[in-house]
Image (tube, coloured by chain):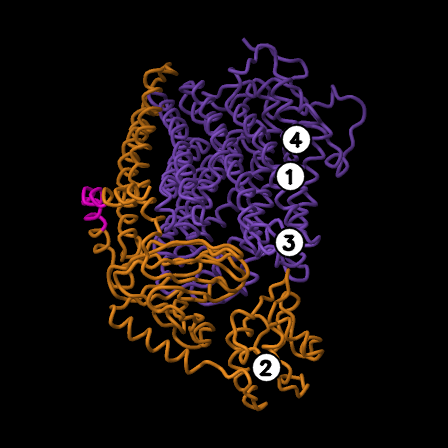
Chain colours: A purple, B orange
Amino acid sequence: MEATARGHADAAGHDHGQQPTGLKRWLTTTNHKDIGTMYLWFSFIMLMVGGVMALLIRVELFQPGLQFLEPDRFNEIVTLHGLIMVFGAIMPAFVGFANWMIPMQIGASDMAFGRLNNWSFWLLIPASLLLVTSLFVPGGAAGAGWTLYPPLSIQMGMGMDLTIFAVHILGISSILGSINIITTILNLRAPGMTMMKLPMFAWTWLITAFLIIAVMPVFAGAVTMLLTDRHFGTTFFSAGGGGDPVLFQHVFWFFGHPEVYIIILPGFGIISQVIPAFSRKQLFGYTSMVYATASIAILSFFVWGHHMFTSGMPVAGQLFYMYATMLIAVPTGVKVFNWIATMWRGALSFETPMLFALGFIFLFTMGGFSGLVLAMAAVDVQMHNTYYVVAHFHYTMVAGALFSAFAAVYYWLPKWTGHMYDETLGKIHFWLTMIFFNMTFFVQHFLGLAGMPRRIPDYALQFADFNMISTMGAFGLGLSQLLFLYIVIGCIKGGPKAAAKPWEGALGLEWDVPSPAPHHTWETQPQVK
Amino acid sequence: METYLKTGFINMTKQARRIGLPRLLAVAVQTLFCASAEAAYEFNFQQPVTKVAQEVFDLHMWMMGICAIIFIAVFSVMFYSVIKHRKSSGARPASFHENTRVEILWTVIPFLIVIGISWPVTKTLLAMRDTSNFDITIKVTGYQWKWGYDYLNGEGEGIKFMSVLSTPEDQLSGKAPRDANYLLDVDNHLVVPVGKKIRILTTSNDVIHGWYVPAFGVQQDAIPGFIRDTWFRADREGVFRGQCLQLCGKGHGYMPIVVDVVSSEKYAAWVAEQKQKLAAGAEDPNKVWQLADLMQHGQEVYVKNCAACHQANGKGIPPAFPGLDGSKVANGPVSEHIATVLSGRPGTAMGAFGAQLSDSDIAAVITYERNSWSNKTGDAIQPSAIKAARH
């Protein structure tokens, strides 16, 4: 924040009129950099909140028996951990990157709708407060899992209503943000910046924004039906009144599956920019990358049933969803091959962003393989709702989304702050995260294969050893992120001066503006040849 | 369709024979890592005891083999590049950035691999879902937080019982050492004969539960208001354990499934024994109970069915689970108390016990609730009153 404040001061020469300072500046700002900064800090705070919840879960599962959390409290923490990490940590982090970087990357002076941008950030605050405070209302938070399946979610106390309201607000925030991103990319590109010259990060975000607009209203509809079932006598999800509990699962996963691509696609974009930068070579197969991203997004609408293989759908349904799901492996594979072909015969160096990008490719591929295993409907019947699924989606969301977010932070920090971060500490952060991540989640594959159900507070003795290892890994993983905070703060406060283009092989308009990026950039649009 | 399903099944066994190598590998890995029989389960699926579970096991090993090959191929290229194409060792970047032939090739090859994978899975799936030609049908009902079993037809028709976690309280609280079947033991096991096709119908009384016996390769959600089906045919005798897999509230981790697979002789003996018990237990609805007997039986029913939420001391865990000690329901009109227990309270965690408990159980537990802790109504509710209230 300080750095952008300084950037602001530097740019004061061509500021128009008076700018508010202090808290009022942050409340009323319409500057994409300020808003991006707020998104990123918000997301980091939520990562810590959700992370503490993860550690509470892990400490309870350290050994058999109930030590710290009653079963109801355990379910509440599990639910909030999921909701906060998805909607509070990961999604806002990528919106933060989009705010900061997309205007600079496409040669626009700001996002298309400044006030809307401000509003979509500030909506996050009441939503996250609703989620966190629901822990303290009578009856506690929603304890039905982040999937909120009825009839269990119908049984919950008022914490559930707060969650529903929070989801509505979060949905509005994401939709407004997406409209802004789409409008910015489609209309504010610099002359000569044709669609097929867009940086991959902008491309993946454009596609993601369409996904968000398509599915967030669906989720809002699903939770609204829950709300009316709970309070206004409707029976959408109750067989007693002619409804069907499985209807909720269909509607939820019609949102939920595109949602996982909403989480990962911007990460793909970041990796597609970091790998070429540190390979000193252009991205291999740019066109096929764009098409692969679009195919993944389109296919994501046709695979939701694979979350419901055990709900009793007809075998024809299982077969359809199985084939469609496996098909996603093809464009995803293309992406991985393209990244590796980009590195092939490049001149590689391994600064922290590159390390996280390599870690991403390596671990995300493992998550992809476990996804393929789960896609085999017959095999999924034995794995669904076990720890194998927990391991799978943490490989894609932590080693996928979170690793790509770390890569982005290290890649762009010099641009944001005007300083270089401490490279040695960055590398230590990477290796600690890499080791502890695998220690936490790799063993969970074995727990799942052996049949340990997810979302249980206590377990049979045969699962004890791996749970103990996993908990120790989780604490290492959590504590390593304090080092990340230390590195970032250190970089904001000082450090070697960063050049406008601190990375030798980096490509893109953002490296043509000085570091730190002044408060206003590209007031005169650049010409792209 | 029928013949298609059958041929699918037979082809798959040939397929299973062809993929012997992964199975060998699996056994090698298991013997390598496992010291005790208990730990033998830890790195992979449980030992399959049905043909379907065996096919699933083989498919998984086969898939792991394919993944391993692709993984090694792809990442040896990446790590070769990481080692050889370093700037620090003087590498100069090439300038190529596309190659249509290569790009088409690595789109088409994965597509073919995916088709190759789908084929055997399809066959196993079709076999897995074919519930025709069964010998015995058992309806499984999920309750918060126990399972109910009804033998609907086949040998043993008419048998029904509830199956509740039997891990002792002092093991749960850690006061006593935990045994090998901690959290995996129930009072009444589901008993089935070996080699017979058992069709399982699942449904639920309250929220969605998941009936799961990994050794059989069976998992089926139990959905309130709907019936779903699955099946298994166990190849060998033994005791097999699973757990509820669908989050169903605070007792989700405490509703295991235990299946005894026994010889047909033993099964026949078990059926006879159960029938005898049922006959002996058939109640005389007009029997008049003494208050002390009702209280004694009522306490047993309460501990098994009510104490998880309302607690043994009657204080509950408000506000989700209200206390009964001094409550309006337990001290108010009897008819309302009976109605609550029989039909539950929609929209709350209070389930309907009318279908789970007999008239005398309900009479006893209501009597117990109305005369325990600080509740002193003096009411002795008779089974006849419950019977009347049911109509």
Percent x, y for residue A207?
54, 27
Mark 4 vs 1: CB contact within 8 A: no
Q: Nearer the viewer, mark 2 or mark 3?
A: 2
Q: Nearer the viewer, residue B367 or B92?
A: B367
Q: Residue furthest top?
A: A529
Q: Secondary structure at mark 2?
A: helix
Residue at 40% over, 20% down: A284
Residue occupied by mark 3: A160
Q: Position of residue A243 (x, y in %)?
A: 59, 50
Q: Which x, y percent locates residue A488?
A: 55, 38
User: Is label 2 or label 4 in front?
Assistant: 2
CA gap, disc 2 and disc 1: 55 Å
> Which chain is mark 1 on?
A
> What whole-number distance in Å separates the C-alpha atoms at marks 1 and 3?
16 Å
Which badge, 4 or 3, comes first in the chain's sequence? 4
Circle 4 is placed at which residue position? A4
| Kind of residue at disc 2 | Ser
The residue under label 1 is: A171
The residue labelled by disc 2 is: B384
The region drawn magenta spans B13-26
Disc 4 with disc 3 on a shared chain: yes
Looking at the image, which is closer to me, B323 or B287?
B287
Q: Amino acid at mark 3?
A: Met
Residue B22 magenta-highlighted: yes
